Amino acid sequence: MTISVIGLGLIGGSMAIDLKRRGFADKVLGVENEPVNASAAEKIGLVDKVVPFGEAVREGDIIIVAVPVGAAVRMLPEILDIFREIGATDKIVIDTCSTKSRIVRSVHYHPFRARYVATHPMAGTEYSGPWAAMPNLFDGRACIFANSEESDPKAVNTIEKMYDVLNMRPIYMNADNHDVHTAYVSHISHVTSFALALTVLDKEKDEKHIFDLASGGFSSTVRLAKSNADMWVPILSQNRDNVLQVIDTYIDKMKEFREAIADYDEDRIRGLIGEANRIKKILR
Amino acid sequence: MTISVIGLGLIGGSMAIDLKRRGFADKVLGVENEPVNASAAEKIGLVDKVVPFGEAVREGDIIIVAVPVGAAVRMLPEILDIFREIGATDKIVIDTCSTKSRIVRSVHYHPFRARYVATHPMAGTEYSGPWAAMPNLFDGRACIFANSEESDPKAVNTIEKMYDVLNMRPIYMNADNHDVHTAYVSHISHVTSFALALTVLDKEKDEKHIFDLASGGFSSTVRLAKSNADMWVPILSQNRDNVLQVIDTYIDKMKEFREAIADYDEDRIRGLIGEANRIKKILR
């Protein structure tokens, strides 16, 4: 099987590595518009060959769209158009984006809609680019299939097998639900990390040595603030309504803490921390 | 040398382990008011013996106060009083608390003030209790000495040697500065994690399966929300003014994100993320 990966960053690159290494793909073609990244991807050996977009779509049995969601929304109908032009009723295109509502809406009425499987492999690091790609990134993590009833069942089955090779467990979900869930368990934590970084960086202007004291706790809380703007701008923008709702709840919680601390109300601080501690039972 | 550790939790217990194991202490006495923790500490072998408070103070060459800062502020003058009663001009007491202004103020005029060395070993995990104690917890981390000019230089020197055995690098700082710095690089990240946990736990009431999607990023951002209320209530309360100032800056940053997302202002979101990304250059 030939796999074409469009976007040779952390996700696309890591999929390319394991799908080839584990024998699911005989050949991996890559598309990468950024020349430096394209050369790096070839040099690292992420893909067999970097090719133009049209060639990748025409040659690949499975086309993996692993670009920021804004670009993916523009690209996906083009790919289905090519499928239609060449009458490719056996090719499959998937995306790996972190928001799903808008992208599934963008091709809802496309005559080749059934050849598209919307997925979100829930794995990653705060790094990006082909040099961030790594083996085993997806092992043991969840992969969402969104609105899979709109896809051809055989196509879904093939993609299930592909993610099985990546050792991911599938979860099936409506695209709108997916976007609510990810706003809570992924998108908000990026915004809180960005805001934390900005807060401390602001202070650093006056206090040069403030980071000398940064502990492991600070590093882990702020880690996601290293995340890439190209990826996160369209996610936050496309998932606007859900993200705003979570931000509002979150700011309310911060204000509750603020008030309790301002009032020296130790019982209330204790109550809030005690409630927050319930997270122990939930996180592994 | 006999070391008495008051409070056999994560910090006290971990110091006990390495000071004994690495030969700095010949004997380690422990004080622990919570009976279950006291039995556990003896059973695990954190200390040679659990003894009453007075005995620990009288027998120890170095007394390590490793209890929540509220209790430490009450306990420290009592210990210096005992030193004075028995004319112990060679004993040393240290604390390990995460706020320093109030505790150094509490004994500023004590006739035996010079026997006290205020320290803050910047290490820890989100777990607590004697079962959370572990070897090598402090290796490579920073230890703050606050207002060390108020302590006897020989006492400071002994404690420097002790922390050297724990492989910590000393940083010398004024207590008030310490509290500003830790508000930014430690205390705020606990508050943001607590608030994040509360936000998601609130939503979980409606959406039972929300945590199925929790990724590694979420886990690391929310990790500190497992932290213990007994420790954190007095820290937030004692460092009230600094913490409030950081919370206010932080809420402003969250609101900037909110506004940019609400306005679909992708350039502004990109600008904020780009600024936040500067954290990369700072964190190792």
Image (spheres, coloured by chain):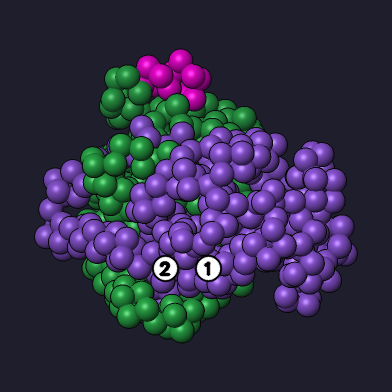
Chain colours: A green, B purple
Above-or-below relation of B202 to B241: below
Q: Is A42 part of what is drawn in magenta?
A: yes
Q: Residue at x 76, y 45 (%)?
A: B19
Q: Position of residue A63 (x, y in %)?
A: 41, 39
Element type at mark 2: helix
Type of the residue with mark 1:
Val
Q: Residue at x 32, y 61 (%)?
A: B242
Which of B244/A247 is in front? B244
Q: Residues within 10 Å of mark 2 (few under 14, many from 20)?
A: many
Q: Which residue is mark 2?
A: B238
Residue B196 percent across, percent down from the top left = 41, 67
Q: Chain of mark 1?
A: B
Task: Using the image as rendered, state which of residue A219 and residue B260 is in the foreground.
Answer: A219
Given residues B5 and A158, the one toward you in this image is B5
Q: Is residue B85 above or below residue B202?
A: above
Residue extent of the magenta highlight: A38-50
Residue A253 in view in this figure? no
Q: Quadrant of the N terminus of chain B?
A: top right
Q: Which comes sooner in the sequence, label 1 or label 2?
A: 1
Residue B220 versus residue B134: which sits nearer the camera? B134
Q: Residue at x 57, y 57 (%)?
A: B112
Q: Secondary structure at mark 1?
A: helix
Q: CA distance from mark 1 to mark 2?
A: 10 Å
B206 with respect to B40 (left or right): left
The structure residue drawn at horizontal position 37% and vertical position 78%, both measured from the top left corner, is: A264
Is residue B257 visible in the rendered structure shown here? yes
Is residue A17 a member of the stretch shown in magenta?
A: no
Mark 1 vs mark 2: in front = 1
Kindly identify the amino acid type of the residue bearing the numbered disc 2. Answer: Gln
Q: Which residue is mark 1?
A: B73
Quadrant assignment, res B230:
bottom right
